[in-house]
Amino acid sequence: MQEKLQTRAFEQVAGMLHPGEQPLAAARAMVGKYNSSRFGAVVKQAVLVEAGGALGAAIASGSGKQFFVLTTHRMIFLSQTFMGGPGKRVIGEVPRTAIALAEVKMGAVSLVRLAFGPNGDGVALTFPRVDKKNAQQLADALQQQSPVG
């Protein structure tokens, strides 16, 4: 099932990719504030936007459940359909050069925390048990693939 969703996400963003840009990973996740907890993000789907961290706040306020596509150049956040697939609406995007893998916690609910630059901006992505492989795939892709400038 995940491979079908990933393929659909890659197809959704295909028209917006730059020459030479390749998709690496895609999955659905609960997107919350950078400082949100694993269980807090699952329980609380409505994300409150704080004054600081405009980029992360804008992405986190798009809706709790989102789909993301990590490419060689950037991370694109998409809306999520009612059935959990990738939507057509682009919520935001962040250049790979601005993304740092800040924290990874695997468990019944997995957490991947991404920092966007030195200003403390970022998002927390939480994945339920069924999407634990997707969380690991994202963490691995961010650790192995160096950002392209």
Image (spheres, grey):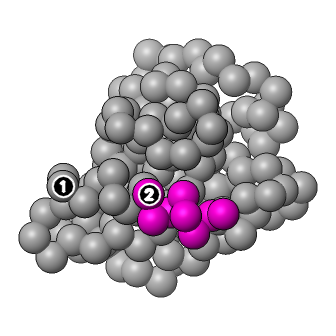
- Residue sticking out furthest to the bottom: 144
Q: Which residue is mark 1?
A: 15
Task: Residue at 82% x, 27% y: name it.
Answer: 43
Q: Main secondary structure of the magenta part?
A: helix
Q: Nearer the viewer, residue 126 or 120?
A: 126
User: How far across and down, in percent of the image, does residue 148 sit?
Assistant: 24, 73
Q: Position of residue 122 (x, y in %)?
A: 48, 42
In the image, taking residue 52 as reference, residue 48 lies left or right, namely right
Q: Is residue 66 visible?
A: yes
Q: Is residue 137 left or right of residue 122?
A: right
Residue at the far right in the pictured view? 108
Q: Nearer the viewer, residue 51 or 15?
A: 15
Q: Secondary structure at mark 1?
A: helix
State the CA–CA distance, disc 1 to disc 2.
13 Å
The structure residue drawn at horizontal position 51% and vertical position 17%, both measured from the top left corner, is 50
From where the camera sits, is residue 53 visible?
Answer: no
Chain-order first, disc 1 or disc 2: 2
Is the residue marked by circle 2 packed among few (<14), some (14-19), or many (20+) residues within 10 Å?
some
Picture disc at residue 92: none
Name the residue carrying label 2: 8
Q: Is residue 93 magenta?
A: no
**Residue 54 image offset from top left, x and y in percent:** 36, 27
Local secondary structure at mark 2: helix
Extent of the magenta region: 1-8
User: Which image quarter is the C terminus in?
Assistant: bottom left
Q: Residue at x 78, y 43 (%)?
A: 38
Is 3 inside the magenta-drawn segment? yes
Q: Which amino acid type is marked by label 1?
A: Gly
